[in-house]
Image (cartoon, rainbow, N blue to C red):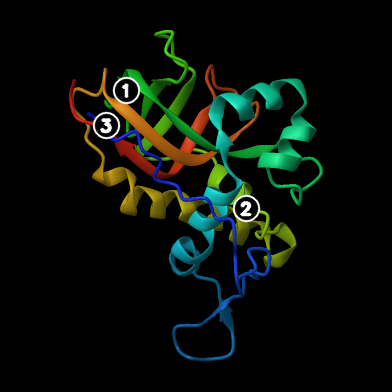
Amino acid sequence: MLNTKPNWPILAVMVGISLTACKILPTKSADGGNSPAFNPDKTVEEIWAAKVVPYLRQKAGPFPEVHTLATTDAAAAGAKYGNPNKQANAPWTFAVRLEGKIVAANTQSRAATADIDVDGDGKADARVQIGPAVRGTALRDSLDFIQFNDFTNQIDFAQFGKAFNSYADKTVLSKLPREALEGRGAKVLGAYTLGSGQDLPLVTPAEAEIGPKP
């Protein structure tokens, strides 16, 4: 059976760490010169365990609670579970914890997904990306210490979003089972963007666990 005990500790006290103090700085060029060369993959690796996962654990709410509020008052949901520092014209992105049963899976595509029933009615409530190809930039956009103005240009900002997806796939998603997923339990810590055009909210995991076959 899937362990139903929470894996996400309550971060009630954060001593000496400011999650909002992260500044994305360019790395030095490979030849050691003074010209900056932004390395998105290296930067994500450096902040993932120290800042990204702790932030999501602290910020995330239960998916049913977040999504209900998001569909009725997106701004209120954004203030509580989202990134209030987002660009004004950008959609809200929310940090969520999700737990339930897999009722459908698409593992034939490189952009593989698992549909999760959260409330036990047998119907999917959210679609979780399990890679290796991961769409969107929900992980990047959920973090209030990542600002567009911290980047030299839009290309660097876009590459940074892709780097989050690549790192999540390398360290989390690639370790998940791919066979006989229907009926298994699943637990996810991640983020999704409101109104992403999907039939179901599309959640990108930063942490994920799939239980044994029933």
Residue at the spot 47% in from the left edge and 16% down from the top edge: 119
Which tag is nearer the camera, tag 2 or tag 1? 2
Q: Residues within 10 Å of mark 3 (few under 14, many from 20)?
A: some
Comes first in the chain, label 3 or label 1: 3
15 left or right of 186 in image: right
User: Which amino acid is tagged 1?
Assistant: Asn
Q: Which label was assigned to residue 106?
A: 1
Q: Answer with mark 2 or mark 1, whichever residue precedes in sequence.
A: 1
Residue 25 shown left or right of residue 120 in the figure: right
Question: Toward the viewer: 97 or 32?
Answer: 97
Which residue is drawn at the image coordinates 50% and 82% (left, top)?
Answer: 29
Q: What residue is shown with label 3?
A: 2
Q: Nearer the viewer, mark 3 or mark 2?
A: 3
Q: Quick check: 90 left or right of 192?
A: right
Q: Is the N terminus in the top left, top right, bottom left or bottom right quadrant?
A: top left
> What element does badge 3 sit on?
loop
Q: Which residue is mark 2?
A: 143
Q: Secondary structure at mark 1?
A: strand
In this rendering, is residue 131 above or below 164? above
Question: Can you see residue 181?
Answer: yes
Q: Nearer the viewer, residue 157 or 71?
A: 71
